Amino acid sequence: MHPRINIFKAAPDALKAVMELENYVQASGLDRRFIHLIKLRASIINGCAFCVDMHVKESRHDGLSEQWINLMSVWWESPVYDDKERALLGWVDAVTRIADTGIPDSAFEALKAHFSDEEMMKITVALGAINTWNRLAVGFRNQHPVDKPVNKAA
């Protein structure tokens, strides 16, 4: 698979606007763990290898456990996520799959039980931002870097 266009050169003003939204998300005051959760789960749902690769590495760098990262794709089956994370994961799933879910009241009520109105707004803006990044990366086939293989001693 090859990139379709260079998103950094095609429309610099458009990319600048997306970067400004990303800068807002990063400075929003949301817990870093929740930002990682939002970005990684939405990227998994959207099938964005570029973003999954990036957000797995960022999550590790920020000290999140391998188990927390690795079970994200099957979060509903794992007790590793606390109630607050589970509510957020349910919201990420519902909002990212909006055409299929219509974002049910149950997802909103679960989120509202753990987050303030301000936090819910910031969470949903963060979710919109990563969904935009995913659409750019998948739509234009941005490729993630390939890590060098680890040499294993025989």
Image (cartoon, rainbow, N blue to C red):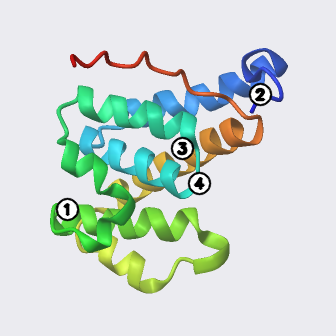
Q: Check disc 1 and report the residue beneath it.
A: 81
Task: Kindly state the secondary structure of the residue where label 2 is placed.
Answer: loop
Q: Position of residue 127 (x, y in %)?
A: 50, 51
Image quarter in which the N terminus is found:
top right
Task: Kindly state the secondary structure of the residue where label 4 is placed.
Answer: loop
Task: Kindly state the secondary structure of the residue where label 1 is placed.
Answer: loop
Gap between marks 3 and 4, in whole Å? 10 Å
Q: Is residue 60 left or right of residue 142?
A: left
Gap between marks 1 and 3, in whole Å? 21 Å
Residue 2 is labelled as 2
Q: Check disc 4 and report the residue beneath it.
A: 46
Q: Quadrant of residue 133?
A: top right
Give the residue type that dot 1 points to.
Answer: Tyr
Give the residue type that dot 4 points to.
Answer: Asn
Going from N to C along the chain, the mark reached first, 3 or 2, is 2
Gap between marks 2 and 4, in whole Å? 18 Å
Q: Position of residue 93 (x, y in %)?
A: 47, 66
Residue at screen point 38% across, 70% down: 90
Going from N to C along the chain, the mark reached first, 4 or 1, is 4
Give the answer, above or below, for where 3 lies relative to 52.
above
